[in-house]
Image: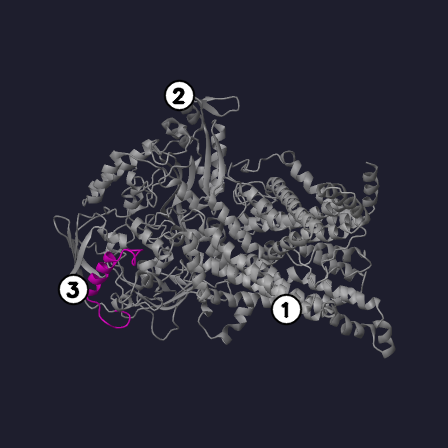
Amino acid sequence: MKKVRALLQASVLASLILTACAGPAAPTAAPSEGTTAPATEPTTAPATGGDTEPSELRIAWGQDPDTLNPAYSFLAVSYTVFDLMYSSLVKEGPNGEYYGDLAETWEVSDDGLTWTYTLRPNIVFHDGTPLVAEDVAWIINTIKDDPEGWAALNSYTAGFVEATAPDAGTVVITTDYPISNMNYRVSVLYAVKRADFEGFASAEELQNFTNAEGIGTGAYKLVTYDTDQGVVIMEANADFYAGAPAIDRLIFQTFDSGDAQVQAFRAGDVDLLYDVPSTAVETVRGIAGTTVVQRPTRGFTELIVNATLPDNDPAPTGNPALADLAVRQAMSHAINKQDIVDIVWQGLARPEWSIIAPAFSGGFYHNDSITDHAFSLDSAREVLDAAGWVPSSDGVREKDGMRLEFRLEFDADSDSYPRIADLIATNFREVGMEATPAAVDSDTLIARTTGVGDFDLVIWGWGGSDPDPDFMLSIMTCGQFVSGGWSDSGYCNEEYDMLYAEQQAALDPAERQRIIHEMQALLFRDLPYIVLTNEDSVQAYRSDLFTGFPDYTADSTYGLGLTDAYVLRQAQPVP
Amino acid sequence: MRQLGTFWRAFRRNGTGMLGLFLLVVSVVLAVGAPWLSPHGPTDTMRDPVTNRVLLFAPPTVHGPLGTDDAGRDIWTLLTYGARISLSIGFLAGVLSIAVGSTVGIVAGYFGGWVDNALMRVTDVLLVIPDIPLILILIAAFRQLDLGVSPLVLLVMVIGLLYWSSTARLIRAQVLSLKERQFVQRALAVGAGHWHIINRHILPQVMPLIVANTVLVMSTAILVESGLSFLGLGDTTQPSWGTMINFAFSRNAVSNGAWWYYLPPGLAIVWVTLGCTLVGNVLEEMLNPRLTRHHLEGEAELPRQAGRGTAPTELLAALTGRSRNGEDSGDTR
Amino acid sequence: MTRTDVILRKFALAAVTIAVVVLLNFILFRVLPGDPVRAVIGRGVRISAETQAALRVQFGLDKPVFPDQFIDTLGQWAQGNLGVSWSQRRPVAEVLVAKLGNTLLLITAGQLLSIILGVGLGLLAGWRRKTALDVGALTFSLITWATPTFWLGIILLVAGSAWLGLPTAGSRDPGNVGKPMLEVLPDIAEHLILPTLTFTLVYLGQYMLIMRSSVLEVLSEDYILTAKAKGLTVWQTLTRHALKNALLPVVTLIALNLGFTVAGAIYIETVFSYDGLGRLFQEALNRQDYPLLQGAFLLLAVAVVGSNLLADLIYAYLDPRVKTT
């Protein structure tokens, strides 16, 4: 498992991306780390009067939740439901900061090893029983102690020593080393009802539990989870700590073709589109009473260059010419990224060069001091000429018996990558490089890249679902280039690895920012990835029926989608 | 040569045959002439001459003759290049399937006994396994093997190696009846070798049947190829007609109202399939006036056709009103 | 050959076929490289290498494929247990049953309509042989034969939604989930219209042809004379005798067609996002959910082989040639 196609590429697969997790056993550093709660608590819109008909928001998405059991759930859609039904100590806010959810305030000790969370009073589960600190400590310890059963969440607790509840209103988490992205980690450790998750005899039994009647403390309670129809129905939680949300019912329905979603939206059968395919955006814009929400994701599409070291075991099969930095730079110059944006993403993306997209924490981590190689076929030719690559009789450049001929592979399931491959191959041909596109099964692609280096160039994308940059940075570390790891380029640079470890423990946000900027500069210098584009996520809702959603055009870095719990709590039906 | 001339004169008089031939010739011209029939290449992006903006989903009124697709490529160009892929796959898979089917049919029919029995049981099993699910699994599995085989070769192999059972039965029945004929018996009596007899006496007799059947099987192969490509099992780097429809569907041509994107490739498939069917039927009729297809070798046997239900042959026979073997009812009874 | 022999042979063939399917379906994926654990949990999902290994053990993938995994699987199946879907973490049988209903509904409706329309059209075409009606009907079925099912589906989807405002996806409206069956019946029917129509057009031609042949035969035989003597009109004769004659081939064709409808269902369910077995099959394939895939393939194969067997049996019982030999 590795990568995901970026959000826009295909609505269905895009949702495969899970929102979360720390890298395998790789503790991480966090964005604005801090000690106290940035108290950006959303105000919940006032509930409508009791005499009116209950309001209902119908949401269409492209994929069923895999299960509503957080122990074994991997799809982004499932996490959307979890964030609505469950609370956690803190949750991600609109601009990369975290607000207190269960926790009213929290602080970290001076050595960075002890985190103390003070809970809000009077939080009750959907069944009316009160939540106590012991419930929270219990689930954190359970996730930490059962790596197999809690397969989906266990890696978030890497580096945790223990969670305790000194009194009913306080949770304390102790860690082995300072963890800079602690907020992000605890944001997915959901406060489940202990009785729901106790007493499973084996990991398998726990994973097979569907949790169709799950009880939490979130703003909405789960009413129906119909796996066969792909429908999730939720109702407003009248006892929610910030008051009941204004929209009384949420219905999530799965459609697996983009056209079908659009038709249903046009016909008024659904009110909100979770993910509008790029090729359908213009159509949706034309539907009366609709607001289309377009916001940049943290995802990107890249050209992976085989940077595997020659002494790797097994030996890499990539064209040795790729080791020449001039060749990689020429490629970067030769690719018309704007064309990819216009043609493949229908304008819903931007050319990009960094694996840390501007959307991370509202631009905090993106290194703005670097300017991308300009698209210029002439520059590409000059770079190659200067490096001694001379066109042969058939136009393909050669040097020392090496020819600039490459395999250009991509996931066979994608309907966008073949388009990108064509554009790149055309660009390359004009500067004397020959790339042969081929569609390959994604699992094969993973097997041939991760830890192996059996490729030349691969087009792929990352979903960028993690709000924290740590994971994205981790995929370029030496240790990840193993089977089961996340590095596919084979890039290995000790300096980079050292910086990576430093940013994990950097509790001061400014310090972490400086390190991460430096890491991006290294990657841009060495070009193991030629990042192509940073895509937008497009959603749409019936603004003639619902209001209160944030104004996305006013805040271009607003990081939460329409179905995020924080956002939905502010929405209300048009009176 | 003279025989061929006579044959052509006879064929020319056949209206349906000529119609089918016309359909086929047009599509072959399209395929062969692709580079000359359009000023664009299959991966070129069309741009507005004034603004230089890429023409995405441009209707035929904006960019002729057939508009552009989701990536601004010329659909007429894609259609002509698509003819190359679709026709070659149809042709190659058809030939492969006939080769396997004929070999099995001749061997089974000629040698009889346990050989026949074994081969026919294999045929029976193949006929009843649900074909599309099997193919889906086969192709997915082979793709994962990552043998470096082009997806198109894979399609040809899978279609060719699965759709031969009905041919095998047909040929076998014919060989069985030939075997009893005098000239074969006489050759056996004078001690001619099996290879000699098959080569000199059997093969020439069943050849016309094989030729006619090839054209018919090609139509099935083209249909199956388009279906598999629609499901995404084709080569996404090559514009076969099925792949075009796949992209049109997955890239929201329907929501965009881009009928010029999904209609032409579908019509092209219908066009070629009809052509093969018409020609194949007429050929079969002309080359084998005495032949009928009997599956009823002493036991009750249902007519089965790999692919979809009724064979086009029967339809055609009914349509042209030509009776085969004095009966109008084909072999469905 | 006696009828018993014929029947025994048919049963043997069916059994062998199922065995082949089981074996094929098992081998194809298990002996191949690739990592189902990765495929099942999806991409972009971070699970530590240790947890991945634990899942492999849980799925039985750490054992040798032969004989261990094979025997395990066979043993489970022998007990009627199809296992647990890796991606959905629910019993495979439960998943299959849930989707089976929708597909059955679609196939049944499509078949019924195509039989009724096909038989009616065939009757007319045969009766009015060589007229524009006859030629038109035959040309129509020839063209539908040459038309790819999925493309026909797309055309109907566009036409049906644009001009008739019919729903184009799913098996019912989202708001109707969980409501009592009776209440949502009209909704379900509405969602069935376009997929069923596609099915009908694809299969109608065959039934029409059989009926037409039967009619022509009756017209050419002595029935007409006899019937005239009895004072029946030609039309009355036709409907009586031709219908009776066509019964055997039509019934066997129905059983045979069940096999081909599997392919049809995969295409049609894909085009109309109809949540039935066809789509389930593709989904299981994409996510390399072996237990689900094997279960789905087994179910499809058993259904097809079973209906073929049924066709053979009907034929063996009704066909006069078998009776006399």
Q: Chain of mark 1?
A: C
Instruction: Tell me the SS state at disc 3.
Output: loop
User: Mark 2 = which residue?
Assistant: A386
User: Mark 1 = which residue?
Assistant: C112
Mark 2 belongs to which amino acid? Answer: Ala
Alpha-carbon span between mark 1 and mark 2 = 74 Å
Mark 1 belongs to which amino acid? Answer: Leu
Q: Is residue A497 above or below residue C160?
A: above
| Front in this rendered view, residue C165 or B86 | B86
| Front in this rendered view, residue A147 or C29 | C29
- Left or right: A515, with A309 as reference point: left
* Range covered by the magenta-colored residues: A125-153
Does residue A432 show up magenta in the picture?
Answer: no
Q: Position of residue A67 (x, y in %)?
A: 37, 61
Alpha-carbon span between mark 1 and mark 3 = 66 Å
Q: Chain of mark 2?
A: A
Task: Judge if badges 1 and 2 mark residues of a common chain.
Answer: no
In the current view of this chain or complex, which residue is farthest to the bottom? C230
Comparing labels 1 and 3, the label whose residue is closer to the camera: 1
| Front in this rendered view, residue B113 or B58 | B113
